[in-house]
Image (cartoon, rainbow, N blue to C red):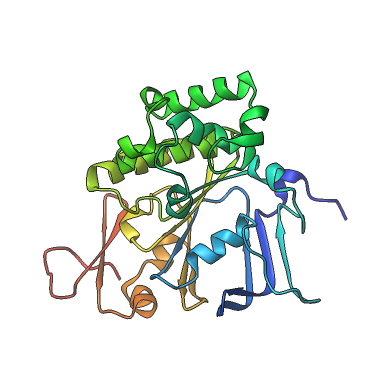
């Protein structure tokens, strides 16, 4: 049998995994495979397991050790965290809140080279000129080059999020993990941020995003995994998964679903201003 190439290996292959966070069992006997070159949205209400699933992909948490259970990232059971970060970039609200308010934009971005939160101590001494140059270049690509010396406390939430995105991109990873990408952003900042994500997808990046808002799922996403209480409610194409019946099963609330300009929208059942999408 021909051995699969690096490109053919699944991004993540989960078999029979049971996962706890503190005293809460989030998943029991979870089975899921996500290929590398697939745009994926993980959708579900708060507490459904979205963030936990992304933390499995990002190697931030591990399943219960069992002979019949495994979680493989790009075909491997074990990874050096710095090596993995060069393959997969992470952007999350949780990561953003771990930075101190006085951290400069440049130090947020360059910390991505060391998988650290900020730049201090040994990390500061290991910084190389080419890393600083790369960080500045990525900030320019995302329109935050003027924030190199600006502390986080003087940035808008949208600017902070773009600095976190630049941090994830310094290694030029093939895959981006986005956990609730527009959390805390107003409409203008949300639209700007999602447009930047779409441009990254158009440039060849793969994304795995977790969200509870179906309107955030870009048309480029080919697969939606719908979760509730650690269970997969539905898994398939956007058209197959984003139906009123599936979403009602996951969110446990009556709703209608419409498709407008290749985006899906959910709205209350007493609003007749938009057409139904079966």
Image side of residue 196 versus residue 3, left or right = left
The image quadrant that residue 14 belongs to is bottom right
Q: Is residue 81 above or below residue 130?
A: below
Residue 204 can be seen, yes or no: no
Question: Could you tell me which residue is drawn at 34 percent across and 37 percent down?
Answer: 159
Horizontal placement of 193 versus 254: left or right? right
Looking at the rendered image, the quarter that the C terminus falls into is: bottom left
How many marks do you count on the picture?
0
Residue placed furthest toward the front: 121
What residue is drawn where x is 63% and y is 54%? 35
Residue 236, image x and y in percent?
50, 65
Placement of 125 over or under 39, stated as above or below? above
Relative placement, left or right, of 189 versus 46 is left
Instruction: Find residue 264 and report its image quarter.
Output: bottom left
Q: 100 or 263, which lies in front?
A: 100
* Residue at 13% from the left image edge and 75% from the top image edge: 270
Q: Position of residue 158 (x, y in %)?
A: 32, 41
Is residue 50 visible in the rendered structure shown here? yes
Quadrant of the drawing holding the N terminus: bottom right
């Amino acid at each position: 049998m021909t051995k699969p190439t690096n490109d053919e290996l699944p991004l993540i292959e989960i078999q029979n995994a049971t996962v706890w966070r503190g005293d809460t069992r989030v998943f029991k006997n979870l089975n899921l495979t996500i290929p590398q070159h697939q745009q994926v949205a993980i959708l579900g209400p708060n507490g459904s397991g979205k963030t936990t699933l992304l933390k499995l992909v990002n190697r931030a948490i591990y399943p219960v050790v069992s002979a019949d259970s495994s979680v493989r990232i790009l075909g491997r059971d074990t990874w050096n965290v710095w090596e993995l970060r060069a393959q997969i970039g992470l952007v999350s609200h949780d990561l953003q809140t771990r930075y101190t308010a006085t951290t400069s934009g440049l130090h947020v971005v360059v910390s991505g080279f060391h998988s650290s939160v900020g730049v201090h101590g040994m990390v500061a001494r290991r910084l190389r000129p080419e890393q600083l140059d790369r960080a500045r270049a990525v900030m320019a690509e995302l329109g935050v080059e003027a924030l190199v010396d600006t502390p986080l406390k003087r940035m808008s939430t949208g600017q902070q999020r773009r600095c976190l995105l630049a941090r994830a991109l310094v290694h030029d990873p093939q895959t981006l993990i986005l956990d609730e990408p527009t959390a805390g952003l107003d409409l203008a900042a949300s639209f700007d941020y999602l447009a930047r994500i779409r441009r990254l997808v158009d440039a060849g990046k793969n994304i795995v995003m977790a969200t509870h808002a179906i309107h955030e799922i870009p048309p480029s996403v080919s697969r939606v995994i719908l979760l509730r209480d650690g269970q997969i409610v539905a898994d398939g194409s956007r058209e197959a998964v984003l139906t009123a019946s599936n979403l009602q099963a996951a969110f446990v609330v009556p709703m209608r679903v419409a498709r407008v300009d290749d985006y899906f929208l959910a709205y209350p059942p007493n609003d007749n201003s938009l057409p139904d999408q079966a």
